[in-house]
Amino acid sequence: MRRIGLRNGEEIPVLGQGTWMIGERGNDLRAEKETLIAGIDLGLRLIDTAEMYGDGASEELVGAAIRGRRQDVFLVSKVLPSNASRTGTRAACEASLSRLGTDIIDLYLLHWRGGIPLAETVAAFEELKEAGKIRHWGVSNFDTADMEELLKIAPAGACAVNQVLYNPDYRGIEYDLLPWQMAHGIPLMAYSPLGQGGELLQSGPLIDIATRHNATPAQVALAWALRQPDLIAIPKASRKAHVEANARATDLQLTPEDLAAIDAAFPSPRRKRPLAMI
Ligand code: NAP
């Protein structure tokens, strides 16, 4: 599995596993846990979760999947903006640690920007780092202006990533946010890289490219996202066949013709668009 470096030089895999809507009531929890474990075995060793997902149920399932092999996984979780005050962040982190069954989170993100002053959340993140509860912190759903503001508040080099929506249907970040992050050495974590398994995977160009490479449209979507140098993609799969296919996406090399076909069907933006989020 290809890896990229965080600002402190630590390397993380470019492909991970999302867990939104995993672990929820009515789901086949055993199958979901086995899929996560299969993903880890296949090299998808970054797992993204959040206190919000299933009100903690996703973190609990992740905790069960990594029991006994915590050191194999780079664990990402997120605090809700409504909890992101100085004391609220600490309490939320403790609750997440307990559900995850670990004493440290590798990367802790502010899920999106809310009403609490950023400086308070940053101070709480720095305290958690100092206390050894988290190793890195970052943000999610931050547009370029938010990132500019954050960098004025945060200690130099402290923000490890920004996690945002990115797939061929949502390329707005290519206009300014992505180049800005590359210029500042802040990797981008792409969420919903498969367009949530919806229409994107039924689109003609993705199907044609997949056919040419003996691959699937999902693998094409992942290979397309991963063409960007400092980017991590976190597809969610609850089925084992899906996680196996996703793990193989890093072998797929798209040609200039493939990329041109995707550009024609899903053009890159020519002007600033507000950051899209789901
Ligand atoms: P996604 O990863 O784009 O798509 C997930 C869907 O694609 C599921 O229905 C899954 O099916 C299907 N799928 C997975 N692998 C496939 C394959 N190889 N072939 C065909 N279909 C496949 O959507 P997402 O869950 O929204 O995004 C991924 C992760 O990003 C989330 O789980 C979450 O961790 C994170 N996220 C973060 C934010 C944020 O605000 N920070 C927002 C959204 C998402 P099965 O489940 O049936 O296998």
Image (spheres, rainbow, N blue to C red):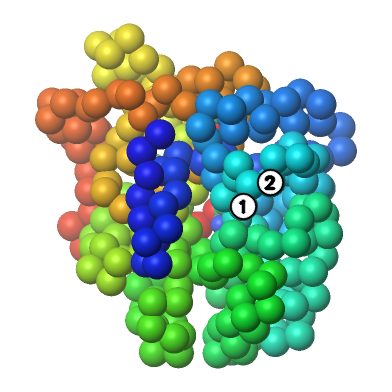
Residue at x-position 87% and y-position 38%: 25
Question: Is the residue marked by circle 1 packed among few (<14), some (14-19), or many (20+) residues within 10 Å?
Answer: many
The residue labelled by disc 1 is: 75
Of the residues shown, which amino acid type is indicated by label 2?
Answer: Arg
Label 1–label 2 contact, CB within 8 A? yes
Whether residue 190 is visible? no
Of the residues shown, which amino acid type is indicated by label 1?
Answer: Leu
Q: Is residue 26 left or right of residue 262?
A: right
- Residue 21's image quarter? top right
Residue at x-position 53% and y-position 26%: 42
Q: Is residue 238 left or right of residue 67?
A: left
* Among numbered discs 1 and 2, the one appearing first in the sequence: 2
In the picture, the disc for residue 70 is 2
Looking at the picture, how far across and down is residue 19, in whole percent? Answer: 65, 42
Looking at the picture, how far across and down is residue 259, in whole percent? Answer: 19, 32
In the picture, the disc for residue 171 is none
Residue at x-position 45% and y-position 77%: 158
The response on whether ligand 1 sits within 8 Å of label 1 is no
Helix, strand or loop at label 1? It is strand
Task: Please identify the quadrant where the N terminus is shown.
Answer: top left
Q: Looking at the image, is mark 1 or mark 2 nearer the viewer?
A: 2
Q: CA distance from mark 1 to mark 2?
A: 9 Å
Helix, strand or loop at label 2? It is helix
